[in-house]
Image (spheres, rainbow, N blue to C red):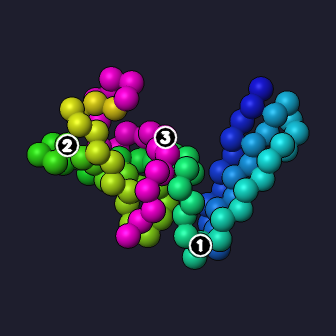
């Protein structure tokens, strides 16, 4: 069984991938480092803006991530609602 463990603190974030009880991969990202495109984040939807077809998601960074969703549903057909949890993949660097 595979598990992803995440530990986010003031100094940075540690992500471990555990398979059958063994640590297979460990990733550390210091708090002040630039996020890398392609990272996957677990986030909480904070604001939904139906007029913009967008939402802002708290992924543990200084600013919430912007998510364009198009038709009030995510890729799996689930309705976007505030306070819901979701997985996101960052595909663009913040400005």
Whether residue 26 appears in magenta in the rendering, the answer is no
Viewer-nearest of discs 1 and 3: 1
In the figure, 34 relative to 57: above or below?
Answer: below
Rendering coords of residue 52 (x, y %): 16, 48
Horizontal side of residue 92 vs 2, given as left or right? left
Name of the residue lying farthest toward the left: 51
Q: Which residue is mark 2?
A: 53
Q: Which residue is mark 1?
A: 33
Range of the magenta residues? 75-95
Q: Residue at image x 41%, y 65%?
A: 94
Q: CA distance from mark 2 to mark 1?
A: 30 Å
In the figure, 79 relative to 49: above or below?
Answer: above
Q: Residue 20 appears in which quarter of the rendering?
A: top right
- In which quadrant is the C terminus drawn? bottom left
Q: Which residue is mark 3?
A: 87
Q: Residue at image x 41%, y 47%?
A: 44
Horizontal side of residue 73 vs 94, given as left or right? left
Q: Nearest the camera: 1 or 53?
A: 53
Q: CA distance from mark 1 to mark 3?
A: 21 Å
In the figure, 8 relative to 82: above or below?
Answer: below
Badge 1 vs badge 3, beta-carbon distance below 8 Å: no
């Amino acid at each position: 069984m595979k598990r992803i463990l995440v530990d986010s603190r003031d100094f940075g974030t540690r992500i471990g991938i555990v398979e059958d009880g063994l640590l297979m991969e460990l990733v550390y990202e210091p708090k002040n480092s630039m996020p890398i495109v392609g990272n996957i984040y677990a986030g909480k939807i904070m604001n939904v803006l139906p007029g913009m077809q967008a939402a802002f998601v708290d992924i543990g960074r200084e600013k919430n991530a912007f998510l364009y969703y198009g038709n009030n549903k995510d890729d799996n057909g689930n309705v976007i609602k505030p306070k819901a949890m979701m997985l996101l993949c960052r595909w663009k660097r913040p400005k």
